[in-house]
Image (spheres, rainbow, N blue to C red):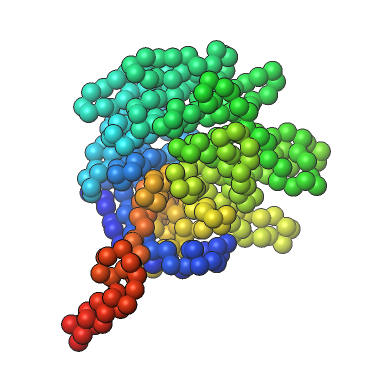
C-alpha cells in the first residue's frame, strides 16, 4: 500500500524553545502511490481523510518529456488508498466531498457520495457545506453565482460562513480581499521593516478559517537597487494584519484554533563571496513561534526532511510533502518524495480516575497502579 507509520518524539525547534513545544509528540504516516516517485498531500478534513497528487515529476514543475506522464490524484482513509487518473485533487471537506479539476479548460468535478457534479469553472476551494469558489463564481445550492463582475477575479478560499478570500485586478494593481456579507474588504499591506519601505508588493491569500482569519504570503519588491523578500501573514476578518511570520516564510493553511502551517527557508550554506543557499522546510506556526517540523524526525523515519506543510485540521493533524530519497541513479540525480500526516499524540492527563477533578484521589490511583505493576 505504500504506508509506513512510526512514532515521533520531538525535541524543541530551533526557533521555538518554549514549554509549549518541548513536549510535542507525533505519529507520522508516509503515503505514496506505488511506482510514483513524487507524492504530495494537498488537503485533510477533520476525520483525517486526505487527498493528494502523485506523479513522475515534482508536482507543478516543468518536465522535459513531451507529453509529460499524467499525474494521479489519491484519496487516503483509514490506511487505504484510492487513486483517480488524470484529474487534479483540490480539496476535501468533512462530508467526504472531494473537489477535482481536469482538462485543458480546467473544469471541475465534485465527487459527492458517489455522485459526480460537473462545474464549468476552475474550482479553487470548497467548504464543509459543499460550496465551491473559483474564478469569480460561487457554487452553492446547485447554483452557479457570479460574485464579482470584474473580468479578472480569482476566488481562492472559502469557510463555512461563506466568507471568501481572493484576488482582483483593479486599475494597474492586483489586490487581495476578503468578501464578507457582500462587502469587499481589501487586505492590508503589512510593513515588515519601517526603515525599508518597498516599492511594490504582492499579497496572495491561501486559506481562511471559521473565525474569518486569513493566511497567505506577502512579497515585497524594492526596485533601486532591485531586491525582494517574502513572509507569511495572518489577517483578521476586517483585513487588518494580525501577525507576521518570519522573513522567507509562506503560510498555506490555518485551522479554527489559529494554528498555521506552511514553509520557511533555512540557511543551508554561506559561500565565501557572501551568497547564501537556503533549504525550504515545513513549519507549524503557533503562539507566535515557528516550529521546524524536521526537528521531530528520528533516525528510523522514512523521511530525510519535511519540506512543505499544506494543510492542518482542527485536531492538529498536519499534512504535506517530505523527501524520502536523494542520490544518483546512473547519470541522473534522483529525488523522491512522499506525502505525510503528522498526528499529535494525546498528552497523559493528571486526572487518572477521570472524575473531572485533579486531586489526591488521582495520586491514590497512581499508587495503586504502581503496586499492581510491581
Question: In front: 183, or 57?
Answer: 183
Q: Is residue 337 visible?
A: no
Residue 230 image position (x, y, % from top left): 64, 43
Q: In which quarter of the image is residue 57?
A: top left
**For the point 63% across and 40% down, which residue is it?**
241
**For the point 30% across and 31% down, which residue is it?**
97
- Residue at the extreme bottom: 374
Numbered-mark total:
0
Question: In front: 43, or 23?
Answer: 23
Q: Is residue 126 placed above or below 55 in the rendered structure?
A: above
**For the point 33% across and 16% down, which residue is it?**
142
Residue 100 image position (x, y, % from top left): 35, 28
Left or right, residue 40 beside residue 238: left
Question: In front: 328, or 33?
Answer: 33
Residue 254 image position (x, y, % from top left): 47, 43
Q: In which quarter of the image is residue 360?
A: bottom left
**For the point 51% across and 58% down, which residue is it?**
292
- Residue at the extreme left: 372
Quadrant where the C terminus sits is bottom left
Q: Is residue 27 visible?
A: yes
Q: Is residue 337 placed above or below 23 in the rendered structure?
A: above
Left or right, residue 297 beside residue 112: right
Amino acid at each position: 500500500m505504500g504506508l509506513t507509520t512510526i512514532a515521533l518524539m520531538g525535541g524543541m525547534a530551533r526557533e521555538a524553545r518554549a514549554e509549549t513545544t518541548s513536549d510535542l509528540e507525533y505519529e507520522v504516516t508516509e503515503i505514496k502511490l506505488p511506482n510514483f516517485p513524487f507524492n504530495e498531500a494537498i488537503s485533510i478534513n477533520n476525520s483525517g481523510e486526505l487527498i493528494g497528487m502523485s506523479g513522475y515529476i515534482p508536482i507543478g514543475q516543468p518536465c522535459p518529456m513531451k507529453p509529460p506522464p499524467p499525474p494521479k490524484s489519491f484519496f487516503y482513509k483509514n490506511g487505504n488508498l484510492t487513486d483517480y487518473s488524470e484529474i487534479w485533487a483540490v480539496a476535501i471537506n468533512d462530508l467526504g466531498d472531494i473537489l477535482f479539476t481536469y482538462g485543458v479548460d480546467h473544469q471541475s468535478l465534485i465527487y459527492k457520495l458517489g455522485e459526480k457534479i460537473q462545474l464549468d469553472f476552475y474550482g479553487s476551494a470548497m467548504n464543509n457545506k459543499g460550496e465551491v469558489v473559483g474564478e469569480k463564481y460561487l457554487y452553492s445550492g446547485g447554483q452557479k453565482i457570479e460574485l464579482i463582475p470584474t473580468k479578472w477575479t480569482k476566488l481562492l478560499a472559502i469557510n463555512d460562513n461563506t466568507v471568501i478570500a481572493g484576488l482582483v485586478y483593479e486599475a494597474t494593481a492586483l489586490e487581495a480581499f476578503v468578501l464578507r456579507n457582500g462587502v469587499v474588504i481589501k487586505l492590508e499591506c503589512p510593513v515588515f521593516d519601517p526603515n525599508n519601505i518597498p516599492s511594490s508588493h504582492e499579497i496572495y491569500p491561501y486559506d481562511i478559517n471559521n473565525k474569518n482569519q486569513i493566511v497567505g504570503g506577502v512579497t515585497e519588491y524594492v526596485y533601486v537597487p532591485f531586491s525582494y523578500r517574502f513572509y507569511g501573514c495572518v489577517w483578521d476578518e476586517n483585513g487588518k494584519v494580525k501577525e507576521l511570520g518570519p522573513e522567507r516564510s509562506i503560510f498555506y493553511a490555518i485551522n479554527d484554533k489559529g494554528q498555521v502551517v506552511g514553509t520557511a527557508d533555512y540557511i543551508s550554506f554561506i559561500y565565501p563571496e557572501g551568497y547564501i543557499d537556503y533549504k525550504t522546510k515545513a513549519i507549524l506556526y503557533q503562539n507566535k513561534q515557528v516550529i521546524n517540523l524536521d526537528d521531530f524526525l528520528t533516525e528510523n523515519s522514512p523521511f530525510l526532511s519535511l519540506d512543505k506543510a499544506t494543510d492542518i485540521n482542527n485536531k492538529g493533524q498536519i499534512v504535506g510533502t517530505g523527501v524520502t530519497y536523494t542520490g544518483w541513479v546512473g547519470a541522473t540525480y534522483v529525488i523522491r518524495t512522499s506525502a505525510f500526516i503528522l498526528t499529535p499524540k494525546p498528552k497523559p492527563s493528571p486526572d487518572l480516575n477521570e472524575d473531572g477533578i485533579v486531586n489526591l484521589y488521582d495520586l491514590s490511583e497512581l499508587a495503586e497502579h504502581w503496586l499492581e505493576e510491581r
